[in-house]
């Protein structure tokens, strides 16, 4: 299993960091300071997003690999503390 932990440094949809992320092809990604997640990543990964610590702050996300998944069951997001 490949796990990636990464401070994305406010990466937006257009950031080249997302191309590298897709090349890494992790089974699970724990990302901090996510500005926005591009659609190409959203097709392969399900996003469990936490709440910002303060207004205007960037989010943290957990992205488990889930081929064809459209959403995460409510019980999973609650159990992770990200729901």
Image (spheres, rainbow, N blue to C red):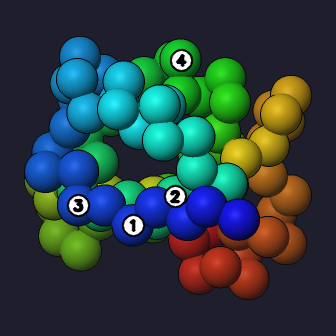
Q: Earlier in the sequence, mark 1 or mark 2?
A: 1
Kindly state the secondary structure of the residue where label 3 is placed: strand
Q: Quadrant of residue 43?
A: top right
Residue 19 showing in the rendered view: yes
Give the labeled residue for mark 2.
29
Give the labeled residue for mark 1.
5
Residue 48 falls left or right of residue 57: right
Instruction: Name the front one of labels 4 and 1.
Output: 1
Q: CA distance from mark 1 to mark 2?
A: 6 Å
Q: Are marks 2 and 3 in contact (CB under 8 Å)?
A: no
- Badge 4: few (under 14), some or many (20 or more) residues near its Cα, within 10 Å? few
Q: What number is the disc on residue 7?
A: 3
Going 71% across and 76% down the picture, which residue do you hit?
A: 78
Q: Earlier in the sequence, mark 4 or mark 1?
A: 1
Q: CA distance from mark 1 to mark 3?
A: 7 Å
Residue 17, relative to residue 50: is it above or below?
above
* Image location of residue 20, percent across then percent down: 35, 32
Kindly state the secondary structure of the residue where label 2 is placed: strand
Going 62% across and 68% down the picture, which residue do you hit?
A: 83
* Image location of residue 66, percent across then percent down: 79, 43
């Amino acid at each position: 299993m490949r796990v990636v932990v990464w401070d994305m440094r406010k990466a937006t949809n257009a950031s080249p960091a997302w191309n590298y992320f897709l090349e890494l092809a992790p089974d699970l990604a724990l990302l901090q300071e996510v500005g926005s997640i591009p659609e190409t990543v959203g097709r392969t990964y399900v996003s469990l997003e936490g709440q910002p610590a303060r207004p205007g702050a960037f989010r943290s996300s957990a992205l488990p690999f889930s081929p064809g998944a459209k959403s995460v069951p409510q019980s999973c997001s609650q159990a992770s503390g990200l729901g």
